[in-house]
Structures are given as structure tokens and as C-alpha cells.
Amino acid sequence: MPDLLYFCGEKGHLICVPYSVENLRQMAEELSLHKDWFRNGRIPHYVIPEQMVEEIQEQCIVVPTREIVKMTRGPGRPKKQTPTEKYEEVQSMKPETRKIFTIRVVYKSGYVHDFDCYSFRMEQGKWLWETVSSANRPLDLGMNDIAAVWQIGVKE
């Protein structure tokens, strides 16, 4: 078993180095800590009751509580992310998104058709689009049959 160093924060938060749950349990045995003082949350550690803090601190290296938190962030415990870092990480995991345009085609007959497409442009006097769904696409009529075409919306 490794030699353990005990660290106690000013308010009784207690860990050991090398830091691991197994080593925390060994420390508890060596210091005769009660099992109900153990906190198995995001950062497993012991919290010593206020009336016992001075007695336990005599057997430990006393450090500011923020140092206790830093010591628990070994190679397996990454630094807490800022909201911006978390947002960027989540965005990088999302599949690539494409803009979806909602198009309205008004035919000379009076028929109006709305559909979604990924790309929408006019080239050489011809409307071009890549529809999102083959079930909802405009009628394949000639340019002379179309009275108007509008982009009526866009979604990310």
C-alpha cells in the first residue's frame, strides 16, 4: 500500500494523496474516521464534524479548501469547464447542420406549394433546389408555368 499524505481544509474537508476512493478508505481506517463522514459525490472526500476538525487537523497537512479541490483533479479529473467551453464542446459534438429554406412556389394556375430545401438559387434563368424530403417537392413544370417563387423562411 502506498504511503498516504493527509490534507485537511480549514473547514474539515479531508482527502489523501495519492487521491483515490480506495486510498480514502485506507485513510479513514488509519485515522479512525466514521463511515458516515464520507461524501461520495462529484469529488469523493470526508467531511469532519466541526467539533473534531482540530483533532483531525493535527494529523494532517492543513491547506485552503480550494487546494483540496485542485488536488483531486488528477489526470482523470479534468478542470471544470466555463459555460463557454462547455457550449463549444457540445457544439463540436453535434452533427454538421445545414440551413433549411422554406420556399413558396405560386403557379400560374393559382396553385401554391410550400416546401423545404437545403439549397435554393437561380442559375441561367432556372430555379435550382435540393429538397429535404422527396415526399414534399414542387411539381416539375416548366419555368413558364411558375408565376412567382419566394423564400418564406429559413431554419438552422
Image (spheres, grey):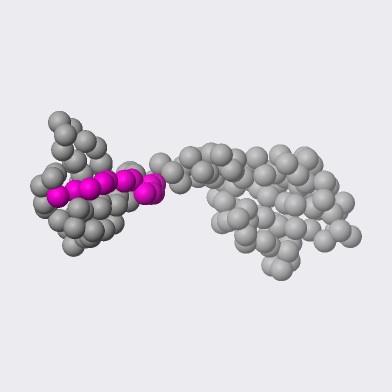
Q: Residue at x 10, y 47 (%)?
A: 142
Q: Residue at x 46, y 42 (%)?
A: 89
Q: Residue furthest top?
A: 124
- Horizontal placement of 60 versus 74: left or right? right
- Horizontal placement of 148 versus 89: left or right? left
Is residue 18 something one can see in this rendering? Answer: no
Q: Which residues are magenta?
A: 145-156
Asked if residue 26 is positioned above or below residue 10 in the image, the reply reads: below
For the residue pair 80 and 72, the one nearer the viewer reads as 80
- Horizontal placement of 50 versus 97: left or right? right
Residue 19, image x and y in percent?
59, 47
Q: Residue at x 23, y 60 (%)?
A: 111
Please identify the dominant SS of the magenta region.
Answer: strand
Residue 88, image x and y in percent?
48, 40
Residue 37, image x and y in percent?
73, 64
Residue 143, image x and y in percent?
14, 44
Q: In the rendered image, which quarter is residue 97 located in?
A: top left
Is residue 15 something one can see in this rendering? Answer: yes
For the residue pair 64 and 127, the one nearer the viewer reads as 127
